[in-house]
C-alpha cells in the first residue's frame, strides 16, 4: 500500500476511512491474497494510533477480506474453491431475482447512470479500472429493486470475488464478452423486461464462473 499524505489525527471516523482504503486496495488487487497488513505501517501512513487500524482490520476480518494468523498478524484472505463456489451459488440465486424486480420499476435516472457506467467500461483502456466499473454498472441496475437485504448480501459477496473478476477480465480476454453481455442486460432493463434481464444476468454470472474456476484452481494449486 502506497504512503499517503493524509492526516486523520483529528478525524472522528479514522477507522472508517482506513477501512474503506484497505478494502479498496484488497478489492482492486493491489493488496494480494496472503499479503501481510502491518498495523504500525498503516498507522504511520495515516498518522493515527493503532486503535483505529485495529478497528478497521476487525471489520475487514468480519467481511472475510482479512484473517489473523499466529506470528503473522493480519493478512489478506484467499478464497478456497469451496468458498468460491458458494459465493457464485449466492450470486446466481440473488442477482437474477434482484434485477428482475429492478427492471420492472427502473427509472430514467437509473438507466442513465447504468448506461454511463456501461459506456465507461467499454471505453476504459486501463485494465486496473475494469473491475470497479463492472461492479458499478451492476450496482446501478440493481438499485431500484427495493431489496436492501439482498443487495447487502450481494455487496459482501462481490467484495470477496472482485479481485478475481478483474483478473479474469484481463487474463481470459473476457472484456469483449462482458461488453456484449452488459449491453444486452441494459437493453432488457430499458425495455422493462424483467424476465429477460434475469436470464441474461444468470448467464452472465455463469459465464464468469466458467471462466474463473480454472484460474482459481491454477493459483490455489500454485501452478
Image: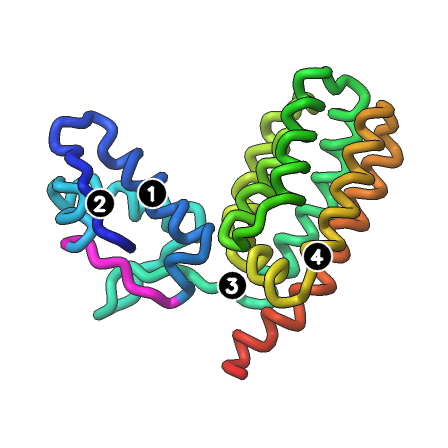
- Who is closer to the viewer here, 159 or 115? 115
Compared across the picture, whether 208 is left or right of 223 comes to right
The disc label shown at residue 4, or none: 2
- Could you tell me which secondary element the residue under label 2 belongs to? loop
- Could you tell me which secondary element the residue under label 4 belongs to? helix
Does residue 72 show up magenta in the picture? no
Compared across the picture, whether 98 is left or right of 222 comes to right
Going from N to C along the chain, the mark reached first, 4 or 1, is 1
Q: Nearer the viewer, mark 1 or mark 2?
A: 2
For marks 4 and 3, give the CA distance: 16 Å
Q: Nearer the viewer, mark 4 or mark 3?
A: 4
Instruction: Check if mark 4's residue and mark 2's residue have beta carbons within 8 Å.
Output: no
**Neighbours of disc 3 within 10 Å: few (<14), some (14-19), many (20+):** some
The residue to which callout 1 is attached is: 21
**Neighbours of disc 1 within 10 Å: few (<14), some (14-19), many (20+):** few
The disc label shown at residue 143, or none: none
For marks 4 and 1, give the CA distance: 27 Å
Instruction: Check if mark 1's residue and mark 2's residue have beta carbons within 8 Å.
Output: yes
For marks 1 and 3, give the CA distance: 21 Å
The residue to which callout 3 is attached is: 79
Amino acid at each position: 500500500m502506497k504512503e499517503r499524505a493524509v492526516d486523520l489525527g483529528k478525524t472522528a471516523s479514522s477507522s472508517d476511512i482506513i477501512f474503506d482504503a484497505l478494502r479498496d486496495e484488497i478489492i482492486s488487487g493491489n493488496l494480494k491474497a496472503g499479503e501481510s497488513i502491518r498495523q504500525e505501517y498503516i498507522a504511520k501512513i495515516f498518522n493515527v494510533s493503532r486503535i483505529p487500524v485495529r478497528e478497521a482490520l476487525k471489520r475487514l476480518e468480519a467481511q472475510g477480506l482479512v484473517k489473523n494468523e499466529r506470528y503473522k498478524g493480519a493478512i489478506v484472505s484467499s478464497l478456497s474453491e469451496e468458498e468460491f463456489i458458494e459465493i457464485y451459488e449466492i450470486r446466481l440465486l440473488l442477482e437474477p431475482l434482484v434485477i428482475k424486480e429492478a427492471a420492472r420499476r427502473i427509472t430514467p435516472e437509473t438507466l442513465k447512470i447504468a448506461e454511463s457506467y456501461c459506456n465507461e467500461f467499454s471505453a476504459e483502456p486501463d485494465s486496473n479500472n475494469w473491475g470497479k466499473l463492472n461492479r458499478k454498472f451492476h450496482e446501478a441496475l440493481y438499485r431500484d429493486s427495493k431489496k436492501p437485504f439482498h443487495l447487502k448480501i450481494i455487496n459482501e459477496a462481490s467484495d470477496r470475488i472482485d479481485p478475481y473478476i478483474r483478473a479474469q477480465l484481463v487474463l481470459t480476454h473476457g472484456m469483449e464478452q462482458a461488453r456484449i453481455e452488459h449491453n444486452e442486460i441494459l437493453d432488457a432493463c430499458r425495455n422493462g423486461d424483467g424476465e429477460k434481464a434475469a436470464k441474461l444476468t444468470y448467464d452472465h454470472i455463469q459465464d464468469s464462473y466458467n471462466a474463473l474456476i480454472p484460474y482459481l484452481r491454477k493459483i490455489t494449486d500454485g501452478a
